[in-house]
Image (cartoon, rainbow, N blue to C red):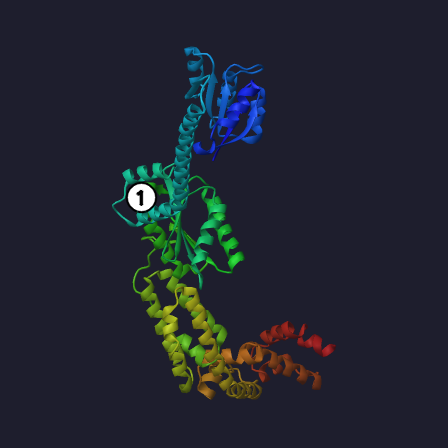
Amino acid sequence: MHKVLLVDDERIILEGISAVVDWKSANTELIGTARNGLEALDAIEENKPDIVISDIRMPAMDGLQLAAKVHERYPGIKLIMLSGFNEFEYARAAMQYGVKHYLLKPCNENKIVEALKDVSEELRQSEESERFVSNMREGLAKVLPHAKEQFLKEFVTNKTYGAHDWAYYRKLFELDVETSRIRLILFQLEGTFDYEHLFAVKNIAGDILPKTLLSSTIGDHVIIAVEDNLPIQELHERMQRIRTTFLGYYKIDLTIAMSEAGDITSARQLYKETLECLHHRFYLGEGSLITKTDLAGPDQAPVGDFSFDEEPLLLMIKTGRWEDASAEIDEFFAKAIEHRADVYTVKSYVIQLFMAIIRQADAERINAYMSKVVHLAEMDTLHTMQSFLKEVAHEITMRQYEQHKSKHSAIVQKVIGIIEEQLANPELSLNWVAHQLLYMNADYLGKLFKKETDEKFSNYVMKARIKKATEMLDQRSDLKIFELAEQLGFGDNPQYFSQVFKKIVGCTPSEYTKS
């Protein structure tokens, strides 16, 4: 039902029209009456009618003045004018305010009902049209984000798209673009995540980046196109804010690949660049921001095959020297990063080294370690492979250390006994003990000795000789310096003996005797 306001300064006409007109048959209802234009404006403001039937000749404000006010303030209201004067000028004046129905007094109720039906139908069609447009807009608003996402996905993966397509879709999506130069940003979520986390990344990035042109998801990645209108350092800082914000909310890390700036029509090439950057996540690790400058250029590529001598590492593991073994493994991975071979080649090197390491374990444990090869091969960053390899190597090395600990102690005790016996021997040295008496590798024996005594072999020998010298001087203060030098392995070099004595004791042998 459309609401009608009736306006006339003659009470008998107001009451007569109100009573005789079949309002319902015209799909209308009378909601009020007014005696002039001023009263009518107040009633319109209060009741918001759809149709106003008004006389033209009225005091205070006539019908034409009322029509002008209604046309200005409430353009959606339809007007029907009544007049007792059959004059063209009134009709023409009314038409300029959108009045289409002009009825001459006296008019019967059928004429009024006919006019009401006509106006009511106009209103119905107008409302229907507005609903249609509103529904279309609402539907478009729902589908537009998906259309934009699909367009970006197609634009970066389909080589047939070009400048003409960009111009068309830019106009269709009403994209406010200041420059045609853009950057593509690709986000990879690390670890286990749900699909809605991808949309969370888009939302966070949309809040932090100043102007996101388009965004979409491609597989497990989020891709965003932004205008190239920020200094590169500020853009890097915003990337870090996106990562830390997402990590703070969801405890999931992000690896971010960012292209160089390029024309929007080269988006496919820029997308390939971000994929190549993301590929180097294997070397740079999770949670990195990777750009083209992080990739190894042709002039940086190492010459020749990747090579690593694993024998020293295996010896360190066998002998329980974890610090040395750890440093050797770090060197292996540093060389792998420097080499920058393709991922599958580097993985084969790591697996090969892993196999060599686990062969140093006890026979019954080798099979258990073998079962972890598949897990190692599935790792997607060099950092995680390094951590895994060091974990296994540490376990094997420490078992070897525990197994040989008692044997090591026995060897060191034997070396200390030899030192005590051979203090007077000028030939006493690590090489002499290792080769002539124990038949061992001198380097290994020296490291073993230092590990258990916390002293280098040569320092230990010097301190033992000077200690023996103080004991001899305590017993016989008349001993000559050259006699002490000869008896404690310094041969015919008493001056050197005195220098060493002073360095360790803090005074010369003569001063020590006097004190």
Q: Where is residue 237 in the image (x, y as percent from the top left)?
A: 50, 48
Residue underneath mark 1? 266
Mark 1: amino acid: Ser
Which one is nearer the viewer's eye here, 370 or 264? 264
Label 1's element?
helix
Against 226, residue 79 (above or below) is above
Give the farthest residue toward the left. Answer: 160
Q: Where is residue 373 in the image (x, y as percent from the top left)?
A: 37, 75
Q: Do we see residue 257 in this rendering?
A: yes
Q: Quadrant of residue 192?
A: bottom left
**Left or right: 3, with 226 as reference point:** right
Question: Residue at point 70% right, 75% down?
Answer: 511
Q: Position of residue 410 (x, y in %)?
A: 53, 88
Q: Please identify the quadrant where the C terminus is shown.
A: bottom right
Q: How many marks?
A: 1
- Mark 1, other Cα within 10 Å: few <14 / some 14–19 / many ≥20: some
Which one is nearer the viewer's eye here, 255 or 487? 255
Q: Quadrant of residue 455?
A: bottom right
